[in-house]
Amino acid sequence: MKYNTQVIDNSKRSIAKAADLLTNGEVVGIPTETVYGLAGNAFDENAVSKIFIAKGRPSDNPLIVHISSIDMLDGLVENVPELAKKCAEEFWPGPLTMVLKKTDRIPDITSGGLDTVGIRMPSHKTARAIIDKCKLPLAAPSANLSGSPSPTTAQHVLNDMDGRIPCIVDGGYSPVGVESTVIAFEENAIKLLRPGFISVDDLKTITDNVLVDKGVLTMLKNDAVVASPGMKYKHYSPSADVVLIDSDCDSFKEYVANHSDKDTWCMVFSDSDLDGVDIPCISYGTTDTEQAHQLFDVLRKLDDVGAKKVYARCPSKTGVGLAVYNRMLRASGFQVIKL
Ligand code: TXA
Ligand code: MG
C-alpha cells in the first residue's frame, strides 16, 4: 500500500485539492454521470502509467480523454468529421465518447498504441469543475480494478483502490450507472463500439446510418483485432458464476426452482419475480434506466453476500437495455440460456 487513500467531498476546496494533485502528475478517483473514473493528466505519460498500474489494466486497452469545453478538442484530434460535430452538439456534455484521429500531443500510452483517441465531455458538475480547475484533458478509465464491475459510488472506488491512489472525490451515486456509449465514424456512418445511455435510437436522430460493431453482442477472442480493445476482455464480473436466463418470468421461476442449491442467488427485476420460490434474490429494477443505474452495485452486492452461482433475468436489449445486456453478457462470460 503506497498511499493513504483519502475520500474527500466535492466542495470547492476539495475540487482545488484534486486539481492540484492532477497537475502534479497524481491519479485521482472522480465522479462522473456514468461511473467513477480514475483520472490523470492525459498528456503526462508518467501519470497515465500510474492509472494502468493502479487498475492492473492491459496496456493495449486505450483510455478515454475527458474535456470540459469544445475548445479543448483543439490540439487533441486531427479533425472532427461533420457527423462528430453534430453528435457533439446534440449529446455533449453527456455520456457519449467519440473515437477520433489523435494528434501527437496524446502519448501512445494514453491511446493504447492506437492512432485514435476516445474523447468525452462529461456532464457531471464535479467532473467538469475538476477539469476546469486543472485546465487539463483527463485520461480516465472506470475506477475499478481491471475485470471488476465499474464503480458507481466513492465507496466502490475505495474498495478497489484503497492504498493505490492518493485521493477519491465523493460526488454521490453516479446517476446513469453504466459507462458512456462509445462510437467511431466510418464514411457517412456512425459505428457503435460500446452501447451506453445514448442509445442506437438516439444516434439515429443524427443519421440513419448507425452500424453496431460485432463485438457488442458476440464473444471475441483475446487475440482478436477489434475496433474497441476493451470489448475483448472479460469484464464486470463478480466472483460468482453468472448465467443469464433469457425468458419470461414464469419460465425463469421454474428454471431456477429446479436448478438451485444453497449458494445460488437470483438477480431479478423485482422481488415479486420469485413469488412462491424460496431462493435469495437481489432486484435491479423494472425499467432499463433503473437497471443501468443499479447494475454494478448489484453485481458488487452479490459478491458481498457470497453468492457462488447467480441466475440473472435478461434485460430488454433495446434502448439503454442494450447497454445493460452488453455488460451482463460480459459479467456472465456469455453464458446465456434461452428458454
Ligand atoms: O463512461 C465512461 O466512459 C467512463 C467514465 C469514467 O468516463 N470511462 C470508461 O473508461 O468506461 P474505460 O476505460 O473503462 O472504457 C473505455 C472503453 C474501452 O472499451 C476502450 O477499449 C474504448 O473505450 N476505447 C477507448 N479509446 C478507444 C479508441 N481510441 N478506439 C476504440 N476504442 C476505444
Ligand atoms: Mg472500464
Image: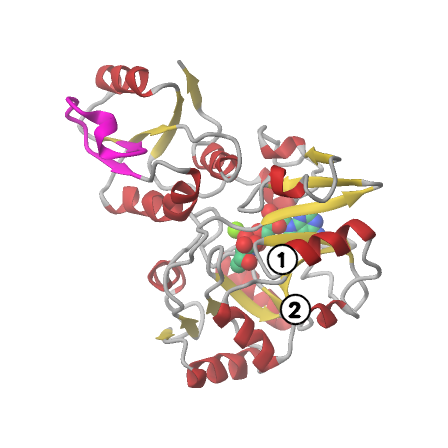
Query: Considering depth in this image, is 147 or 198 the residue closer to the camera?
Result: 198
| Rendered position, 315 above or below 207 | above
| Label 1 beta carbon less than 8 Å to ligand 1 | yes
Residue 140 placement, left or right of 159: right
Give amino acid for label 1. Answer: Leu
Q: How far apart are the two marked residues, 2 and 1, measured between alpha carbons?
A: 9 Å
In the picture of the structure, the residue carrying the numbered disc 2 is 42
Q: Position of residue 33 (x, y in %)?
A: 48, 59
Q: Is residue 33 left or right of residue 291?
A: right
**Residue 278 part of the magenta segment:** yes
Specify the segment rendered in magenta. 266-283
Task: Report which quarter residue 105 is drawn in.
Answer: bottom right
Residue 176 numbered tag:
none
Q: Element under label 2?
A: loop
Q: Name the residue under label 1.
A: 63
**Counting other residues with Cα less than 10 Å from the Cα at mark 2, is it few (<14), some (14-19), or many (20 or more)?**
many
Question: What is the x, y in percent for residue 303?
Answer: 29, 44
Which amino acid, mark 2? Ala
First of labels 2, 1 by sequence position: 2
Which SS class for mark 1?
A: loop
* Label 2–label 1 contact, CB within 8 A: yes
Quadrant into which the N terminus falls:
bottom left
Is 4 or 123 nearer to us in this picture?
A: 123
Question: In this rendering, does residue 112 appear at all?
Answer: no
Q: Position of residue 190 (x, y in %)?
A: 73, 41
Quadrant of image for the C terminus: top left
